[in-house]
Amino acid sequence: MQVFSERTDKPHAYLFGEYTNPLSFDPIELALSEDGQAWQSIFDNSSLSNVYLIDFDWLPPVIADTYRTAGTRDGQELANSRLDQRDLVLRFIAYCHGDADEKLTFQSLSNFLIRRHNYWVAFDNGGGRMYHVREKTIAAEYYGDKMMMITVTLNNFTGVAQSIMPSTHINEMPNIGLGLPTDTVNYVFNTSEFDVNNIGELPVDPLVQGDYLDITLTGTGSPTIANTTTGDSITCTKPLTTGDTFNLIGVNPQINGQAAGINTDNGIIRLASGNNHFKITGCQDLNCTVSFYFKYLN
């Protein structure tokens, strides 16, 4: 999957001999995607060739607590706690030829960032993470008719970041900042017991949070997949034969691409942050793939 531009002449700070390069800094590359798969880089948008992202702020996580009273007991007690939505603030600088060019540049950046649907944003210095956002505000500050600063506020409504790549493809792009261990991580297994390393800062919970988790199992027998770390398990009560594939996509089980909730014990699987020990019983000649996104506070 290609996230950032493949250009070999990306905008960059002035180097010796580059007499026509006006930049004194390395701009940050911003990429957008509506599905997290097909990406568009700002460097590939010809209408924004004079617009450069100079900074963006990771605002700290927003904790939303709910309290309740208990009869005549003094004070309140914590009922639940969750991560609330937060803002991402982007700052652009644009070099223009005049007043009309400033207006056209502002319109082009607005068209690039304002969309009908939610979308993902990623930054080339953002540590392999992406944010699910909606555009909130965009405002320009003019310095004559040749330069302007544009501040864009995006609403990260999920309150968290996640890896651009799922676990099974994590090595397909640089991932400095994700917390990958120095040894090789693996998410494809052919043994009955194995460890799944959730290197993210947050658990993966398909039931409560709606997180993506795709467990694919082939083999023969009636398998029980158990995460002994969290105590979760699911059993496929219909015997699998050679060529059958059992999938648990979130909380929805499938056999050979068909809904199979009636053929399970309605179990679920979640992942704790860190190491998760899995044990599969009742199945022979198995092959298991665990695909999910790593989640981060920032």
Image: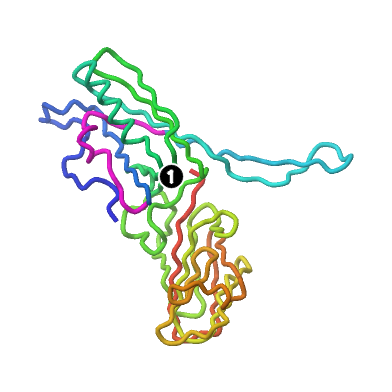
Give the crowd class for mark 1: few <14, some 14-19, many >=20 residues within 10 Å: many
| Residue 237 position within the rendered picture, expressed as x and y whole percent measured from the top left | 57, 81
At mark 1, the secondary structure is strand
Determine the residue located farthest toward the right in the rendered image: 72
Left or right: where does residue 194 sit relative to residue 169?
Answer: right
Can you tell which quarter of the image residue 170 is in?
bottom left
Left or right: where does residue 212 sit relative to residue 109?
Answer: right
Three-letter code for the amino acid on which mark 1 is drawn: Tyr
| Residue 51 in magenta stretch | yes
Q: Which residue is drawn at 27% across and 38% down?
A: 42
Can you tell which quarter of the image residue 273 is in?
bottom right
- The magenta segment is 36-56
| Residue 26 position within the rendered picture, expressed as x and y whole percent measured from the top left | 26, 34
Q: Residue at x 49, y 66 (%)?
A: 249
Nearer-the-camera pick, 10 or 137: 137
In the rendered image, the vertical position of residue 108 relative to residue 76, given as above or below: above
* Image quadrant in which the N terminus is located: bottom left
Nearer-the-camera pick, 122 or 259: 259
| Residue 129 in magenta stretch | no
Q: Which residue is drawn at 45% across and 75% down?
A: 288
Q: Which residue is drawn at 46% across and 46% down?
A: 161
In the rendered image, the vertical position of residue 218 relative to residue 84, given as above or below: below
* Residue position for label 1: 131
Left or right: where does residue 252 sit relative to residue 256?
Answer: right
| Residue 89 position within the rendered picture, expressed as x and y whole percent measured from the top left | 43, 31
| Residue 77 position within the rendered picture, expressed as x and y whole percent measured from the top left | 77, 43
